[in-house]
Amino acid sequence: MRWAWTLVVFCGLLQPGLCLECLECHGLPYNCTETVRECYAHQPTCISTAYSYEDASGTKELLVKGCSQGLSCNESAYVNMGTRAVYISNTCCSRNQCNSGTYYAKATVSQADCAVCSGDSASCSSPALRVMHCTGVQDLCMSITTLTIFRGAARETVVKGCGTGPLCGRTLEYNTGNTTLYNKVECCHPRNCKPQVPTVSVNNTLNGLQCFACNETGKNECNATRITTVNCTGQMNRCLDIVDFGQGKTLMRGCCSEDVCRGLPASLSVPSYQSLYCCQGNLCNNGNIASYFSGGRSLQVSGASLAGILLLGTAWWWAL
C-alpha cells in the first residue's frame, strides 16, 4: 500500500507518459469529437458515460468521456416519471485511450410498481396516487423531498416514482451563499410499496467551517473578484468546488454535506460533465485543485454519478 500511494503522489511529477491518458469528449454518441487528456495521478481509469432522455418530443442522446477516480464504474440506472424518462450507464477501463468508440446507455427490465407524484408534501401524501409499472433497471420506489432556499425565499418540492441507486437515507445539503439546498430520500423494495414523504430538517447551527462560495448562472458570479465566503452550518462539514472539466471554469463553490462528496452532484443545474471536488479546512476550496489532494483530505468525482443523477434529476431538474 505504501508503494501504491508513493506512485499516486509522484505520478504527476515524473516525465510525461507515466500517468494514464484518456479520451475526452462531450456530444452525440455517434459524433463525439475526442481529444486526448492526461489524467491526474488520482484518476486511474478512463470512463464513458451515456445518457438517454425520453419525453413527448422524442429521444435525446449524450455521451461524456474523460478521466475518472473510478468511484462509479460499470453501472446502469433509470428513472421514469411517466412523461419523462432517463437512462444512464457507464463503463470504465484502465489502459491509455481505452475509452474509444461509440457507447450508448443500456438498461435491463424491472418488475416494480410505484406510486407517482410531483408536487408538495400534502399532494404527494394522498393515498390515491397513480401507480406506474417500472421498467429498465428500476428496483426501488422512491420519495424525495427537496427544500431550496434562494435569497431567503423557501420552496419545497416532493417527487415520487421509480428509481435505482444507493440513495436510501442519504442527506444532500449545500450552501453557495445565495442558495441553500436540503434533500432527503426514502425508498422501499417490495411491489406496490408506499414510501413516506421524507421530512427535511434545517440545522442553522454554525459548525465553525468557512468556505468560498459562488453559483455561476452565466453572469460571472464565480469570477475571482466576485467570489464570497459562507459560514457553514449543521452537517455541511466539507467545502466543495465544482468545475467544468471542458473549460476548467468554476461553476459552484460553497459548503456541503459529506454525502454530496460521495459521488452525488450538487444539482443538475450544473452540467453533467463537471468535476466535483471536496476538501476539509477553512477556505480550502480556493481553486487550487492540486491543494485539495494534499494530506489526503479530499475526494474528487469526475462527471455526475448515476446515483446523483437519479436523485437530483428527479427532485430538482424535473420539478422546475
Image (tube, rainbow, N blue to C red):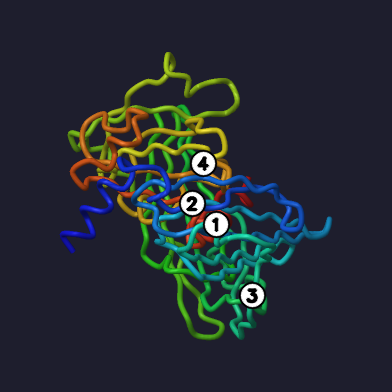
Q: Secondary structure at mark 1?
A: loop
Pointer 3 residue: 107
In this rendering, the answer to whether 304 lies above or below 129 is: above
Q: Earlier in the sequence, mark 4 or mark 1?
A: 1
Above or below, 214 relative to 160: above
User: Depth check: 241 or 69 in front?
Assistant: 69
Mark 2 to mark 4: distance in Å?
A: 44 Å
Residue receiving disc 2: 21
- Using the image as rendered, state which of residue 275 and residue 48 is in the foreground: 48
Image disc number at residue 97: 1
As displayed, is residue 287 above or below residue 22?
above
Out of 293 and 1, give the one closest to the viewer: 1
Q: In the figure, residue 48 lies in which quadrant?
A: bottom right
Residue 194: x and y in percent read 51, 76
Mark linked to residue 155? 4
**Quick one: label 2 or label 4, which is nearer the N terminus?**
2
